[in-house]
Image: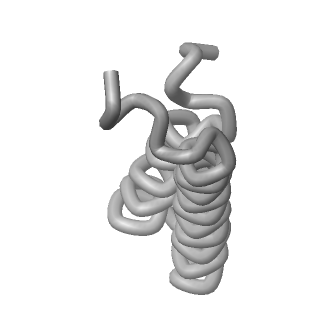
């Protein structure tokens, strides 16, 4: 797993694509399975966004806690 892909989003995207192909070219997969795979991918993407937001909020809090020292330097 790549460092920028901690949640396995690329793997989930491949799963969605594979499920779509299975639904299109065989009877091994249903539309419900495609929707479930897409829902799982969306949840992982939302989790990633929330983690990035929390990181940025933490960095902002740290900057404020340091009293804007970097501006004065």
Please tell me which residue is depicted at 57% across the width and 46% down the height of the picture.
67
Q: Residue 43's x, y, as percent?
A: 64, 70
Q: Residue 28's x, y, as percent?
A: 61, 61
Please tell me which residue is depicted at 34% across the width and 65% down the height of the picture.
24
Please tell me which residue is depicted at 60% across the width and 59% down the height of the picture.
57
- Quarter location, residue 30: bottom right
* 65 relative to 3 in the view: left or right: right
- In depth, the one of 65 and 4 nearer the eye is 65
- Quarter location, residue 3: top right
Q: Is residue 49 above or below residue 55?
A: below
Looking at the rendering, in which quadrant would you find the N terminus?
A: top right
Res. 19 visible in picture: yes
Looking at the rendering, in which quadrant would you find the C terminus?
A: top left
- In depth, the one of 15 and 1 nearer the eye is 1
Res. 44 visible in picture: no
- In depth, the one of 25 and 66 nearer the eye is 66
């Amino acid at each position: 797993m790549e460092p920028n892909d901690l949640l396995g989003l690329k793997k989930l995207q491949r799963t969605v694509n594979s499920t779509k192909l299975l639904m299109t070219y065989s009877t091994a997969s249903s539309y419900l399975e495609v929707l479930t795979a897409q829902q799982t991918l969306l949840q992982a993407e939302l989790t990633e966004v929330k983690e990035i937001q929390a990181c940025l909020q933490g960095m902002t809090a740290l900057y404020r806690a340091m009293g804007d020292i970097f501006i004065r330097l």
